[in-house]
Image (cartoon, coloured by chain):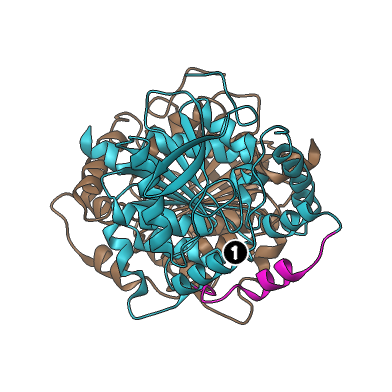
Chain colours: A cyan, B brown
Amino acid sequence: MTADIHQTAPTQFVEANGIRFAYRRFGKSGGVPLVFNQHFTGTMDHWDPAVTDGLAKQREVILFNNAGVSSSSGEVPTSIDGMAANAVTFLKALGLSAVDALGFSIGGFVAQEIAGQAPNLVRKLILVGTGPRGGEGMATLTPEAQQIFRATYDEPDHLWLAVHFTKSEASQAAGREFLKRFRLREENRDPEVNKEVAPAQLEALSKWGIRFNRSYDYLKTIHQPALVVNGSRDVIVYPINSFILQQHLPNAQLILYPDANHGSQYQYPELFVRHVSTFLCGEGLTVERRSA
Amino acid sequence: MTADIHQTAPTQFVEANGIRFAYRRFGKSGGVPLVFNQHFTGTMDHWDPAVTDGLAKQREVILFNNAGVSSSSGEVPTSIDGMAANAVTFLKALGLSAVDALGFSIGGFVAQEIAGQAPNLVRKLILVGTGPRGGEGMATLTPEAQQIFRATYDEPDHLWLAVHFTKSEASQAAGREFLKRFRLREENRDPEVNKEVAPAQLEALSKWGIRFNRSYDYLKTIHQPALVVNGSRDVIVYPINSFILQQHLPNAQLILYPDANHGSQYQYPELFVRHVSTFLCGEGLTVERRSA
């Protein structure tokens, strides 16, 4: 137990399968830690301290860069399967026997695969701004996403105002607050990802997004209690995909936030932290009732 | 302020437009009261004290029977419009200038119409197990609902095990607890509704359910912050209708609960009370952010 928070937690390293994984751990230790799986081209510094520190008050939080991303060595696999295998390698290298897994966007694909590959390692799942294999509009980047990622911005960070927030005044104002927060950490920031990351991640997410017969069947095998969260106006991964996840997972709760794009959890960080905390504490959920 | 709770609150009466409305008020007074709009053939006694008393800890709760239902006089209108007009009459007769409106099932249709007819009277909306005009499978009772309402049961109350809960062991166990709770009030219970109620309500809900061109457009005019809640396996009003409500209302949050049928709020009463309380307190919601 240290007094570290998002801004101060040192970047640590653990080596396994020839990969040197960069990670940061902070918060209240002793329970099941919550592991964060990041979005397309993101690093540990792209998480919102209002969310990570908010959740760290009641549990240990682990951020990490998967193989090939930023301060981690190795190569980015061109499949979600491969990314999940690397994540499992990392978690086992830390000696963890149980984690809660949060995944955002492509990190949500990875979190689903982690649950599939290592069902006994994952206690609960939190799937944010994400979707199922072969979901709606997921075989390629959506038209809106293509436009957003191709555009140029006055400041590079402003890409995230377009990705994570809607065009409404309230959402953009929340976005500017988010950008301030994610720049709060000044020392030992992660390097931006290299040029090989985006193409490999794009290949992986495109393969994941291909519709096939009974694409959603695999969700029936993910028995962990899951919380599915999205913005009601997500143009990167359409919110119908969150509804599909919830309908096909055996034990999932769905929460959609109003007037929010891909980064709904950054638009409503306090509300998100409260909802996630309630979910992780398990109150009122069927599985708790069964075991009571 | 009285010490009344769900089981002890006396049935009171107020007369307006020639109708004698029966109602009960309890909980913490002084703020915006929360008014409950009941489901098909239900009376004030069909609410769950775990929900009403749970919410009454932080606000005043008002239960009532709309015109023609149980202990209220008058006739049940054959349109949702007419029911909403009667509800507005009732609320104005109590001298209320602002309420939060919760509606369950057909009561959710009524709550939407109340917001449309008296937008300045309604501060926030909670729409449970309900849907939009012309929603999916709403022009008639769903096949599952027809089967459930036509069947006979060992005990009449067991109808609600089939309506409100799924067939899973955990859900049925929660249902039996619900039935115990809603029988806790022993004195001054409402009489069951008379035989004219079901046909009139059926006519009203069938008209509401008819799909027409741009059926959902009216939702754009309901600007109140709304919380839409349903069970993921609701066979009475399919959960896609909750998704549709959320997508078309300008400022709505959606919560779907796992392994739950029409009465998800009775399966997870503590979780529902917590989610509703968070919503009504407004934390993290756009409208609060705007006015901050």
Q: Position of residue A138 (x, y in %)?
A: 52, 72
Q: Position of residue A285 (x, y in %)?
A: 34, 41
Q: Residue furthest right?
A: A154
Seen from the viewer's position, the closer of residues B103 and A193 is A193
Q: In the image, A274: left or right of B178? A: right
Query: Please, is residue B225 above or below residue A143 in the view?
Result: above
Q: Decide if residue B255 is in sight here.
A: no
Identified by mark 1, the residue type is Glu
Does residue B198 show up magenta in the picture?
Answer: no
Does residue A152 show up magenta in the picture?
Answer: yes
Q: Position of residue B5 (x, y in %)?
A: 43, 25
Seen from the viewer's position, the closer of residues A15 and B115 is A15
Query: Please, is residue B56 above or below residue A74 in the view?
Result: above
- Report which residue position mark 1 lands on: A196
Residue A132: name its quadrant. Answer: bottom left
| Residue stretch in magenta | A136-153
Residue B162: name its quadrant. Answer: bottom left
Q: In the image, A35: left or right of B253? A: left
Q: Decide if residue B228 is in sight here.
A: yes
Q: Residue sitting at 64 percent across and 35 percent down?
A: A50
Seen from the viewer's position, the closer of residues A100 and B44 is A100
Q: Residue sitting at 27 percent across and 59 percent down?
A: A221
Image label count: 1
Q: In the image, A149: left or right of B229? A: right
Q: Residue furthest front?
A: A18
Seen from the viewer's position, the closer of residues B166 and A206 is A206
Query: Please, is residue A194 above or below residue B66 in the view?
Result: below
Q: Secondary structure at mark 1?
A: loop
Where does the N terminus of chain B fall, quadrant-wise? Answer: top right
Please give the chain letter of the residue carrying mark 1. Answer: A
Where does the C terminus of chain B fall, quadrant-wise? Answer: top right
